[in-house]
Amino acid sequence: MAAGSAATKQDLFDEAQTKNAAAISSGYSAKDIEVLEGLEPVRKRPGMYIGGTDARAMHHLFAEVLDNSMDEAVAGFANRIDVYLDAQGVLSVSDNGRGIPVDPHPKYPGKSALEVVMTVLHAGGKFSDKAYQTSGGLHGVGVSVVNALSDRLEVEVARDKRLHRMVFSPWPRPRRHRGFRPCPQSTRHDCALSSRSRYFW
């Protein structure tokens, strides 16, 4: 029995060696190294960011958006959070907090801080205690992960009495060629209070 087990292990080892030799002979080079940029790593391996692809993981996406509103409330900048889920599965989260900044980001010329937060991993205001003393969520990863894994995401931010809106949706089609691009940011109408809304499905 022991001898048979040893032989089996040796066979497996020999098979692995043969496969490795074949892989080497086929030419493993720099061109075989993939570099995933933007939000593509999230779409490729969602489990690394939200723990899977089941219903519990979907709930995690909602929690990430809600955490942002909760952080505003805990910090004393918001006293109202509204959550709405419609029959089509569109989830809306809004609060009357400060809203994500919409001015140009110094590190990304031509992009607002809002666009950077929504499309760049590890971009947010929670890495230091300048904006928040305490915070929840994935710290600069959460809302961009939600964007990456949503079929469509809309964000509205009211700052300085103006409402700014960005939409992220699958493009181009078909879906297997999925990519995200922001619609042009537009200032719509005066708004009396600072607030933000996010709709995603």
Image (cartoon, rainbow, N blue to C red):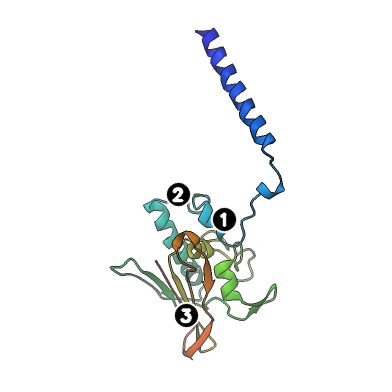
Q: Amino acid at mark 2?
A: Gly
In front: label 3 or label 1: 1
Q: Position of residue 68 (x, y in %)?
A: 49, 67
Q: Nearer the viewer, residue 98 or 76?
A: 98
Q: Is residue 68 left or right of residue 13?
A: left
What's the CA distance linking mark 1 and mark 2? 14 Å
Q: Is residue 188 above or below residue 153?
A: below
Q: Amino acid at mark 3?
A: Ser
Q: Earlier in the sequence, mark 1 or mark 2?
A: 1
Kindly state the secondary structure of the residue where label 2 is placed.
loop
What's the CA distance linking mark 3 and mark 1? 30 Å
Q: Residue, x 57% and y 22% (percent of image)?
A: 12
The residue under label 2 is: 52
Position of the C terminus by quadrant: bottom left
Q: Is residue 102 above or below residue 22?
A: below
In front: label 1 or label 2: 1
Judged from this view, the residue extending furthest toward the left is 87
The residue under label 3 is: 195
Q: Is residue 74 above or below residue 41?
A: below
What's the CA distance linking mark 2 and mark 3? 31 Å
Q: Position of residue 89 (x, y in %)?
A: 33, 66
**Local crowd size for mark 1, using a 10 Å CA cut-off: few (<14), some (14–19), many (≥20):** some
Query: What's the mark number on residue 126?
Result: none
Q: Residue, x 67% and y 30% (percent of image)?
A: 21
The residue under label 1 is: 41
Kindly state the secondary structure of the residue where label 3 is placed.
strand
Q: Is residue 61 left or right of residue 118?
A: left
Q: Residue, x 49% and y 65% (percent of image)?
A: 147
